[in-house]
Image (cartoon, rainbow, N blue to C red):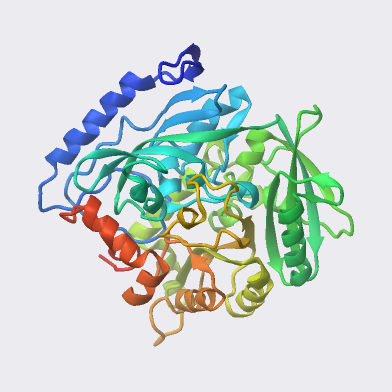
């Protein structure tokens, strides 16, 4: 990338190979594809990949052409900002920013998650205890609305309502074509401490203290997440940025990151990664989900091509399973009923975390589970307390939450309702004043869903920005099976 004059800021900026002219051409193709869709057909993306686990509606109508919206447009290393096309993956975004010692404020765990997807569908990672969610680092967004218009939404501009309502709308209010985001300085290496806990309440108390102090046992904490293997074995993974050179571990081959965390204690187990490998530490094995494909078996892993040790390839295997019902066929040969998919991320207040984990470990036979603390950013990017309450995902800005992620399946019992385990999880999360992400299966009744995810505020936004209902309604997209 060459350093060129940025005519928008008057500062030095790193311009990618695509740049502004290519981006404008991509936007024109997008608009042309919108106009080509029949007026009575729902508008959707013509996208081959997805990080959603819920069933998508079948459609033979042409989709929106987003092929020109997959690149970083410009990085300004002085202002620490980037202009990014909406369909750009975090893998490409990080590749463009790391050469300048910069990274997005939150980098979701999987390489093929797009920036636009993380903003409209929410994302989270180990900086979320200090940087909140991806949409909180957004300065402005160009959005193709359901009405076929591209508007620029900012925190305090004409479309501030759309700026605040876009997160968690999942493409039902429009699609981002460009996002201007803040970046932060990062160091070349991350020093890790794996802290073991044998009691979930002690774990909960430690998370609360670390979020407040941003340090542990006298050392700063820049990254914070954790893993629960069972009630008596859980870990917090504390990361500290450093520029000190030294040996680093490699978890892109035979070694598996989540297994490296485990130890008997009592003191911390230490490790070290490059910043690049830290950001993508979970992608190689899709956390621990690669075990479903046998790739954690050393005899298989030894011959598994390294380029296929990544989440995007596992997604292809999942797509084949969904298309041909492979897993259900295997269960049927064993004389078993199909299994219920339980792939969810939920958030509960920090003080209810141990309570939720006790219930979950007793009722839902899935392990391990991922933990990721979350607190909305200070100061608010939208200027005041009322606006900080992003209406479609209204978590309290004064509270700390813990995201709990679990991704597997459970046995079904003949005669029980569809999605019984997922329904029980939804009930428990609501009971504990928590929230659930909508990237996977949901079973809420419409009234409860409306109360949890925007209510009349969402309805007003929908009428304003998608008056002819060209895009699916959020309830239809997240809950109803079509």
Residue occupying the point 69% across, 51% down: 224
Residue 3 x %, y %: 51, 12
In the picture, measured across the screen, residue 78 lies left or right of residue 148, that is right
Report the quarter where the C terminus lies.
Answer: bottom left
Residue occupying the point 64% across, 63% down: 368
Farthest residue to the right: give it: 266
Residue occupying the point 41% across, 37% down: 140
Q: Is residue 215 above or below residue 77?
A: below
Residue occupying the point 59% across, 27% down: 98
Instruction: In this rendered view, identify the residue nearer to me: 159 or 2.
Output: 159
Residue 120 seen in this snapshot: yes
Q: Is residue 388 above or below residue 307?
A: below
Farthest residue to the bottom: give it: 415
Instruction: In this rendered view, identify the residue nearer to me: 372 or 263.
Output: 372
Residue 244 x %, y %: 80, 28
Farthest residue to the front: give it: 384
């Amino acid at each position: 990338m060459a350093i060129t004059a940025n005519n928008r800021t008057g500062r030095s900026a790193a311009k990618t190979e695509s740049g502004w002219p290519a981006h404008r051409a991509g936007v024109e193709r997008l608009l042309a594809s919108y106009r080509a869709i029949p007026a009575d057909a729902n508008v959707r993306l013509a996208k081959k990949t997805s990080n959603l686990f819920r069933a998508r509606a079948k459609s033979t109508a042409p989709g929106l052409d987003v092929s020109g919206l997959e690149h970083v447009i410009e990085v300004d290393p002085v202002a620490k900002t980037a202009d990014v096309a909406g369909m750009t993956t975090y893998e490409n975004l990080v590749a463009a920013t790391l050469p300048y010692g910069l990274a997005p404020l939150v980098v979701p765990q999987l390489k093929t998650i797009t920036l636009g997807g993380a903003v409209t569908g929410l994302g989270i990672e180990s900086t979320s205890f200090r940087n909140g969610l991806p949409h909180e680092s957004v300065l402005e967004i160009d959005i193709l609305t359901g009405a076929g218009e591209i508007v620029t939404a900012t925190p305090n501009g004409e479309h501030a309502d759309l700026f605040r309502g876009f997160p968690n709308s999942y493409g039902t209010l429009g699609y981002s074509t460009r996002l201007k985001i803040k970046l932060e300085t990062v160091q070349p290496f991350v020093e890790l401490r794996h802290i073991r806990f044998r009691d979930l309440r002690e774990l909960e108390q430690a998370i609360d203290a670390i979020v407040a102090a941003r340090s542990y046992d006298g050392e700063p904490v820049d990254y914070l997440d954790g893993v629960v293997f069972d009630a008596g074995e859980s870990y917090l993974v504390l990361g500290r940025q450093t520029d000190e050179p030294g040996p680093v571990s490699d978890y892109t081959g035979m070694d598996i990151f989540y297994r490296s965390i485990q130890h008997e204690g009592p003191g911390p187990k230490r490790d070290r990664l490059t910043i690049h490998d830290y950001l993508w530490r979970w992608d190689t094995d899709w956390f621990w989900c690669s075990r479903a494909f046998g790739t954690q078996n050393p005899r298989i892993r030894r011959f598994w091509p390294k380029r296929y040790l990544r989440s995007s390839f596992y997604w292809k295997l999942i797509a084949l399973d969904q298309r041909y019902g492979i897993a259900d066929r295997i269960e049927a040969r064993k004389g078993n009923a199909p299994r219920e998919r339980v792939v969810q991320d939920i958030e509960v207040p920090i003080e209810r975390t141990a309570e939720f984990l006790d219930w979950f470990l007793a009722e839902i036979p899935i392990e391990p589970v991922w933990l990721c603390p979350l607190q909305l950013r200070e100061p608010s990017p939208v200027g005041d307390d009322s606006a900080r309450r992003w209406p479609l995902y209204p978590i309290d800005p004064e509270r700390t939450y813990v995201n709990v992620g679990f991704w597997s399946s459970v046995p079904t019992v003949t005669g029980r309702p569809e999605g019984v385990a997922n329904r029980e999880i939804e009930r428990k999360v609501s009971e504990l004043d928590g929230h659930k992400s909508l990237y996977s299966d949901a079973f809420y009744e419409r009234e409860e869903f409306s109360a949890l995810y925007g209510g009349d505020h969402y309805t007003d936004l929908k009428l304003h920005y998608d008056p002819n209902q060209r895009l699916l309604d959020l309830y239809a997209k997240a809950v109803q099976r079509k």
